[in-house]
Image: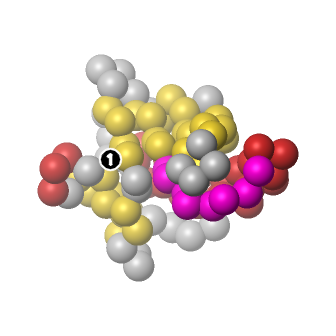
């Protein structure tokens, strides 16, 4: 798994450093973060769990990096398949 460092960038969006990854959406709640990562993958619904597993390491790295900012844990991570219109919970 890649080691990432995050900071809060422009428009309060979390930006993870080391190849400059940007989290699609880091939603900040009163007591936690929720990570929402957009994927433009046109696969059918039956493929979403496999794809979510494929990207789970990336989202775990984002979660670790955001948690390292201090103050708030990551409550859950989600993938939004924008083309095929689905949302899959990866953790939480």
* Residue drawn at (66%, 59%) of the image: 42
- Magenta residue span: 37-44
Q: Nearer the viewer, residue 63 or 70?
A: 63
Quadrant (top left/top right/bottom left/bottom right) for the N terminus = bottom right
Reply above or below: 29 against 43: above
* Residue drawn at (76%, 50%) of the image: 44
The colour style of the image is secondary structure
Q: Is residue 81 visible to us here?
A: yes
| Residue reaching furthest to the bottom | 19
The residue pinned by badge 1 equals 69
Q: Nearer the viewer, residue 76 or 69?
A: 76
Location of residue 15 (image quadrant): bottom left
Q: Position of residue 2 (x, y in %)?
A: 56, 70
Left or right? Give the position of 63 relative to 33: right
* Residue drawn at (26%, 50%) of the image: 13
**What secondary structure predominates along the stretch shown in magenta?**
loop
Reply above or below: 87 against 18: above
Q: Position of residue 21 (x, y in %)?
A: 40, 68
Reply above or below: 92 against 81: above
Q: Nearer the viewer, residue 87 or 91?
A: 87
Q: Position of residue 76 (x, y in %)?
A: 54, 33
* Residue drawn at (36%, 73%) of the image: 20
Q: Is residue 53 visible to us here?
A: no
Q: Position of residue 43 (x, y in %)?
A: 73, 57
């Amino acid at each position: 798994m890649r080691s990432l460092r995050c900071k809060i960038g422009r428009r309060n969006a979390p930006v993870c450093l080391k190849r400059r990854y940007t989290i699609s959406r880091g939603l900040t709640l009163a007591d936690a973060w929720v990570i929402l990562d957009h994927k433009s993958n046109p696969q059918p619904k039956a493929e979403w769990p496999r794809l979510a597993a494929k990207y789970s390491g990336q989202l775990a790295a984002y979660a670790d990096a955001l948690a390292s900012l201090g103050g708030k844990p990551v409550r859950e991570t989600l993938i939004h398949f924008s083309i095929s219109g689905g949302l899959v919970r990866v953790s939480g």
